[in-house]
Image: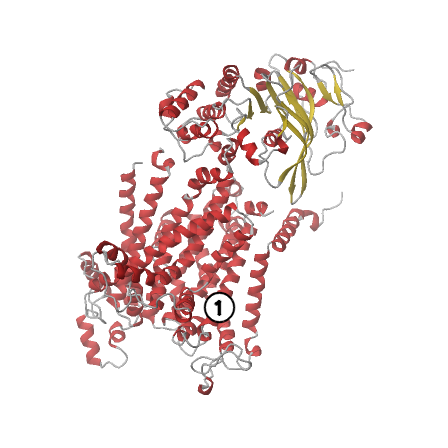
Amino acid sequence: MKKSSWLDRHRSQIKEAKFSLFLVRRNLLILVGFITIGVMLGLAVFAPYITHYDPTDMQFSQRLQAPSASHILGTDDNGMDIFSRIIFGIRLDLIIAIAIVGVVAVFGTILGVFSGYHGGKLDELYMRTADIFMAFPYLLLAMAIAAVLGPSIFHSIIAISITWWPVYARLARGATLSVRERDFVEASRALGARDSYIIFRHILPNVIAPIMVQATLDMGNVILEAAALSFIGLGAQAPQPELGLMISIGRNFMRDYWWVATFPGLTILIMVLGFNLMGDGLRDLLDPKLRRSLV
Amino acid sequence: MTAPLLEVKHLKTYFYTYEGTVRALEDVSFHINRGEIFGLVGETGCGKSVTARSAMRLIEAPGKIVGGEILFKGRDLLSLSEDELQKIRGNQISMVFQDPMASLNPLMKIGNQVAEVLKIHKKVESGEKLRKRVVEILRMVRLPSPERIVENYPFELSGGMRQRVMIAMMVSTNPELLIADEPTTALDVSIQAQILSIIKSMKEKMDVSVWIITHDLGVIAETCDRLCVMYAGAVVECGNVHELFQNPLHPYTQGLLKAIPKAHEKAERLDTIPGSVPNLISPPSGCRFHPRCARAGRECSERGAEKVKITDTHFVSCRRYTEGNREQ
Amino acid sequence: MKLHHYIIRRLIFLIPVLLGTVTITFFLMYSVPSNPARMIAGPHATGDQIKKITEELGLNQPLYVQYFKYLNRLARGDFGRSILTRRPVVDDLLTYFPATMELTLASMVFMILFGIFFGIISAVKRNSLTDHAIRVFALSGVSMPIYWLGLILLFVFYFKLGILPGPGRIDPYISAPAHITGLYIIDSLLTGNWEALFSSVKHIILPAVTLAYATTGMTARITRSSMLEVIQSEFIKTAKAKGLSQRKVIIRHALRNALVAPVTFIGYEFGYLLAGAVLTETIFGWPGLGSYAVESMTNVDFPAVLGVVILMTFIYVFVNLAVDILYIMIDPRIRLGE
C-alpha cells in the first residue's frame, strides 16, 4: 500500500487555502486594503530615498507655499516640505502603531489565555480589572496619563498601551473559554495531555484568528488615537513629523493655506481605511460561517 | 374525473453555489387532487422541501426554478407576477413549516401574528370582531384558554402549542391547499399524534386539501390518502396508500418499507439500503438510484428511468420494477 | 428575575467599577510624576513656591492618605479647586456640562436617525451600488480623524461657502437664552426666543455632524448586519408565506427584531461620542467638558483633570446601564422569561 503523500494528507487544508485566495480575489475591498497597506509600508521603509527634503528642515523663505513642482504638497508655516513630512509621518505613525499593538496584543493575549484557561479567583480579579479599565470612555484616560507624564511620543505610547490591553485580554479570554469547554479538550486531558500542550495545540489556534483581526483593525485605531493625542498637544512635539501634530499646526492657517492641514489628515484617512478594509476582510475570511455566505 | 388542484409538471430547480450547480429537482412531476391528503415522502435531502417552496415560489438566490410548470387550479404559478403570488400565498395556498419556534416571530404576540393573515387577505378590520375570530380559530385547533394565548409570546408556549398556532394561522383564511412541511418532525412523539389529528380535522371542517411532506412513513400511513416517493430530486413512485404499502414496485420504495423494524418479526439485523445518497452536484447518470439498486442494468444508467402506469392511480419510474414482496 | 431586582443588582455592581475608575485615575495621576507640585508650579518656579504648593495641596502626605482624603471630599461633591481657574472644579464642570450635553444629544439624534435608516437600506438592497456606497461611507467614518473632518467641513461651509456659521454655540451678537436647562436650543424653545433658537441650531449643525459622522457609520454597519441576519430567519419565511409584500415583511417583522442589536450598541457609541466631543469641541470652540478637559490636561491642572475624567466616566457608565435596562424592557423574552 502506497504511503500517503504530504499533498494527500493536507488535501482539505489546501482546499480551504485555495478557497481563501478565491474569496480575496472576488472581494475587491480586501484587495484594496492589502494594496494600500503595502504601499504605505513601502513609503515608510524607503522614506529617505523618496524625498530629498529633510522633514524637519525649516526654510522660512519658503513658508506657506501652495503645492507646486518643487514642493508637491506645499510647505507649512516653517517652510518645511509637507510631502516629506507626510512620508516620514507615515513611518513614524506606523512604528508607533506596531509598538503599541505588538506589546498590547502579546501581553493581553497571554494574560487572557491563562486567565481564561485556569479560571478561579485570579481570573475574576484580572477580568474585573479589565472591566474597570474599559469603563473609561475611549481616549480620556490616555489623555490624562499622557498629560501627567509629560507630552512626548514615548509617553503617549505608554498612555495608550495602558488603556488598550483589556481589549485583548477580554478577547483572548473569551476565545479560550469557548474552546476550553469543547469535548475534544476534555478528551485530550483524559488522554493525559499537559496543560501547556493543550494550550498550544488547541487553544491558541482558535485564539489567534480573532486576535489577528483585532490587531489589524487596531493598527488603524491606534494611529487615530496617537494622532489625536498629538493634535491636542499631548504627544509628539514640534518639529516632529507626526500627522496629527501637522493638522494641529495647519489648523491655524486653514482659511488661506488649506493644504497644510488637509494632506496630513487625508493620509491618516487612507492609512486607517487600509487597515480597516484589511481587518474587515480578514474577519470575513476567517469566520467559517461567513466564508460560505460570501458566495 | 375532476381536474387536480395542483399539478407539478417537470419541475427543475437548481442551486448555483461555489462548488457547482446543485440539481436539487430534476424533472419532478406529480399532482394533488381536491379533498385528499397527499403525502410526499423521502429521506432528508431528496428535495421534498425544495419542491414545496418552489410551489410557493419561495426559492431565493442562489436557487432558481429553471424549468417546468406548476398549475394551481389551471394557472401556472411560475408565470405569475409577485403581486399576484402575494394574493395566493396565505390565502389560497398556505404553508406550515417544520420548526414552529423558529417560524414564529419571537417579538410579536400570538394574537397579532394570527390576526395579520386575516387583515391582509380577508380585510377584517382590527377590533373586537378580529379578536373574536382569532380566538375562534385558536379554539378550533384545540388550544386551551385561547383568550389568554392571544396575549402570549411564542416562547411562552410549548412546541405542540406553537405548531397548533401555525396551523391555525395558516388555515384561518380558508385556503384550498395547505402544505405541511415536516409538521411533526420537531415535536415529541406523543404530540405528533395530536398534531396529525388536528390536521385531519381541519381538512374535514374547512374543506382543505393537504400536502404533507415528511420522511416518516408512519405519518404517511396514518394520515394520507395518496403519496409519492422522492429520491435525489426525482419522483420514483406514486400511488394511493394501500397500493403502495401493499405492493411497492420501485426498488427504493421496497427498500424503505423493508427497513422498517417490525415488532412482531424476529430478526437479528435490520435491512438497509446499501450505499448513500448521491451528491446532487454531480448526480449519477440516468436513473439516480441505479448505483444502489440491486436490479440496475445498462439501460438504467444510460437511458434513465421510465415512467410506467400500473393502475389509474399507481405509477412507478423504473425499468426493472417487480411485484411487491415477491421476488421475480 | 423582576426588573427592579435586576436594576438593583446592576447598581450594586456599579459601585466597584466607579470606585475602581476613581482609584485608577487618582493613582495614575498622582503617583506617576516625580513631583506634582513642580509640574503645577511650572518650569520657572522657585523652591519656595514649590514648597508652598506642596503644603497647600497636601502633596507631602503619603499617597494613600491623599487618596482617602480625596474620596472623602468626592463623596461630599467636592472635586477640589482648579489650579487654573481658581474656582471649585464642581462649578467649572457644571458650567461646561450643558454645552457638551447639547452637542452629544444632537449628535445622537442624527446618528440614530441616519444610521438606522442607512443600515436598513443597505441590508435590503444588499450588494447594490447603494449598499456599497453606504458601506464605504460607514467605513470612512471610522477611519478619519474627527478633528480633521471638522476642519474640512468648517473650511467648505464656513470659509468658502459661508452658509453655516463658524465656531461657538451662538452668534456673538445674540445673547444666550435664559438659563433653564443650559441647552440653548431647548431654552430658546421654552422661552420663545426665536432669534436665539435659529442661531443655536445653525451653530450646532457642523459640530453635531462632525461628531456623529463616525458613529452614524458604526450604527449603519450594525443595523445592516443585524438586518441581514434577521432576513435569513425562519419566521421571515413564514411572513412571506402569509402573502405579505416585501415592504410589509421588512417593516412589520424584520425591523423590530433587527433593531435590537443597534439599540444595545448605542451605549457603547455614547462613549465614542464623549471622547469625540473632546476633539470636536476644540475645533469648533465649543465651550463644553471636552474643551475643559483639553485645557486642564495641557496645563496639568490635577484636580480639574481628575474631575472631568471622573465625571465623563461616570456619565458613560450610567448611560451604559440605562441602555442595558432599556434593552431588557424591549425584549419580552427577557422581561417575561424565567
Quick check: can you spot residue C23?
A: no
Judge by depth and name the residue closer to the eye, A140 or A271: A271
Judge by depth and name the residue closer to the eye, C187 or B20: C187
Number of marks = 1
Residue B114, given in percent of the width and then of the height, sits at 44, 28
* Residue matched to label 1: A266
Tell me: B229 left or right of A229: right
Judge by depth and name the residue closer to the eye, C282 or A10: C282
Instruction: Please give the name of the residue rendered at 36% of the width and 40% of the height, measured from the top-left corner.
Output: C330
Residue C33, given in percent of the width and then of the height, sits at 30, 71
Tell me: C267 left or right of C84: right
Quadrant location, the C terminus of chain C: top left
Work out whether B215 lies above or below C304: above
Colour option used: secondary structure
Tell me: B257 left or right of A110: right
Residue B123, given in percent of the width and then of the height, sits at 45, 28
Residue C299, given in percent of the width and then of the height, sits at 29, 72
Which chain is mark 1 on? Answer: A
Work out whether A206 lies above or below C5: below
Instruction: Please give the name of the residue rendered at 23% of the width and 54% of the height, measured from the top-left corner.
Output: C190
Image-quadrant location for residue C295: bottom left
Q: Secondary structure at mark 1?
A: helix
Judge by depth and name the residue closer to the eye, A261 or C310: A261
